[in-house]
Amino acid sequence: MIHQIQQHKKELLFIFKCILIMGILCFFLYQPMMQIFENPQLLRKQLQNYGLWGQIFLTCIMILQVIFVFLPGEIVEIMAGFIYDPIHGLMLCLIGCAIGSFLIFTFVKKWGQPFIEHFISREDMKQVHFLHNPQKRNTLCFLIFFIPGTPKDLLTYLIPLTEMKRSTFLFITTIARIPSIITSTIGGHALGIEDYMFSIIVFTVTGIISLIDLFIYNKLNKKTLSYHL
């Protein structure tokens, strides 16, 4: 009993340190971030001038987005492409997603469903019942992270409740995220170099594909759910 209490204290202390470090980084770079609403190009130059610290800051924003889902991931991805080039932005976003997913997987494995219920309702959990089918789980997990518009954040919290290994989950999701992120960073970079027509085309095509994919996903999910019920 005493050992378990000490273990929980260590885990909470680790979480607190992670949040504190990211909070300090965000505090010092808060003002430059607010300038995106007034002068996006100035923000772009400032974060580029911060060098490694600017990249760490953007990665931390992505980590926080994955864990707390406080804003759509696409916004951070567009910002990454806007500030840096598409490939550089892609790498920063993938690193942030991988770290955030690693932390979530670790926390859920340790604390189980009660931890998840702080972030996701039980109704939402019912939508991804297929996760307990080992024959379909890996393939469907890849497709959901590959297709724009699907509930990736929901899956990140629920996959750890299954038998899937953490290394398998991180490998599948990191590879599958690439097409979705690269389209956002390409569009963001086009905004950064003021090629507005190209960025509109990228975002429009991506948006249409996302809506179609989301519609198909919802149809299939409802059909499968009604079958199981």
Image (cartoon, grey):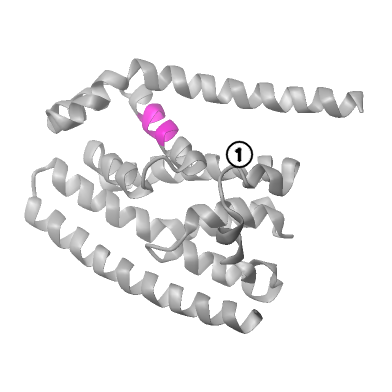
Does 218 lie within the magenta span? no
Q: Which residue is painted at 31% across and 21% down in the image?
A: 30
Q: Find the magenta span and give its range.
A: 55-61
Residue 26 point in image, percent of width and height: 39, 22
Q: Quadrant of residue 32?
A: top left
Image location of residue 146, percent across then percent down:
44, 64
Rendered residue at 68%/76% (across/down)? 135
Looking at this view, name the residue that lies furthest to the right: 1
List x then y, in percent, for residue 25: 41, 20
Q: What residue is shown at x 30% (from left), y 45% (from top)?
A: 75
Quarter occupied by residue 92? top left
Residue for point 56% across, 45% down: 119
| Residue on which disc 1 sits | 103
**In the visual, does 105 lie left or right of 37?**
right
Q: Is residue 129 above or below residue 66?
A: below
- Check disc 1 and report its element: helix, strand or loop: helix
Please state if 226 lies on the left or on the right of 88 as rendered: right
Callout 1 amino acid: Leu
Q: Would you say residue 174 is visible in this rendering?
A: no
Q: Is residue 56 magenta?
A: yes
